[in-house]
Image (cartoon, rainbow, N blue to C red):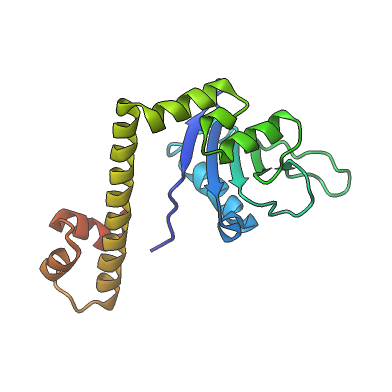
């Protein structure tokens, strides 16, 4: 079974471009080939069977990293394909952007990265972001939403762990489906889908 990927944020902007935003505290999670893999997985799921390749939308993979993983001291690292002989951009609609989360210059990017790492809304530059932080940290409604989001994330992580267990048991090949259901907590239909090579 091929490796899958779970994207942190997948959005569409006003021009129809698809954006995958990944927030990475670990330098290991922001490796260059991971950006390539995320980009390829986006492309693989954006066209219907038989649809013309010209219909493929513009895509952006954006890594916001806690450290300056490129180690060049820049706020942004845009990556584009180009013709090596001329430097002219290839213009295939695929873009990768690394945002240096450690950058603190007196620019919109520097101020945004400052706010992004702030725990106190009073210390933020941008009022819109500060208001949202106050809502989620100080209001009853916001706290309930965050608690629900954390619970959902915990449950998703647990389920992913059980899927991994079920896949390993299927790989061994000596367990009955009912045994896999009992041990993993997945439903019989879910285990059958995994056996057939389908994703849940």
Label total for image: 0
Q: Position of residue 161 (x, y in %)?
A: 31, 61
Q: Nearer the viewer, residue 35 or 118?
A: 118
Question: Residue visible at 20% across and 60% down?
Answer: 191
Q: Position of residue 69 (x, y in %)?
A: 68, 54
Can residue 46 be seen here? no
Q: Quadrant of residue 79 in the image? A: top right
Q: Is residue 125 left or right of residue 121?
A: right
Q: Nearer the viewer, residue 144 or 187?
A: 144
Question: Residue visible at 52% across and 26% down?
Answer: 130
Q: Nearer the viewer, residue 55 or 87?
A: 87
Q: Is residue 39 left or right of residue 97?
A: left
Q: Position of residue 152 (x, y in %)?
A: 29, 44
Question: Residue visible at 52% across and 35% down?
Answer: 120
Q: Position of residue 142 (x, y in %)?
A: 35, 29
Q: Nearer the viewer, residue 190 or 138?
A: 138
Q: Is residue 199 left or right of residue 32?
A: left
Quadrant the N terminus occupies: bottom left
Can residue 111 be seen here? yes
Q: Is residue 138 left or right of residue 193?
A: right
* Rendered view: 196 above or below 111: below
């Amino acid at each position: 079974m091929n490796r899958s990927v779970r994207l942190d944020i997948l959005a569409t902007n006003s021009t129809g471009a698809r954006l995958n935003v990944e927030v990475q505290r670990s330098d290991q999670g922001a490796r260059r080939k991971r950006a390539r893999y995320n980009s390829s997985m986006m492309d693989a799921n954006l066209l219907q069977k038989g649809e013309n390749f010209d219909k493929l939308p513009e895509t952006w993979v954006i890594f916001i990293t806690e450290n300056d993983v490129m180690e060049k001291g820049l706020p942004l690292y845009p990556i584009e394909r180009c013709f090596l002989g001329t430097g002219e951009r290839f213009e295939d609609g695929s873009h990768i952007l690394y945002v240096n989360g450690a950058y603190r210059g007196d620019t919109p990017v520097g101020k945004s990265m400052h706010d992004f790492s702030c725990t106190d809304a009073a210390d933020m530059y941008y009022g819109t972001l500060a208001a949202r932080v106050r809502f989620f940290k100080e209001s009853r409604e916001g706290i309930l939403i965050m608690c629900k989001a954390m619970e959902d994330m915990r449950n998703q992580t647990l389920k992913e762990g059980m899927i991994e267990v079920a896949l390993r048991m299927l790989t061994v090949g000596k367990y009955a489906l009912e045994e896999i259901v009992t041990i993993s907590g997945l439903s019989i239909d879910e285990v059958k889908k995994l056996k057939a090579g389908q994703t849940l």
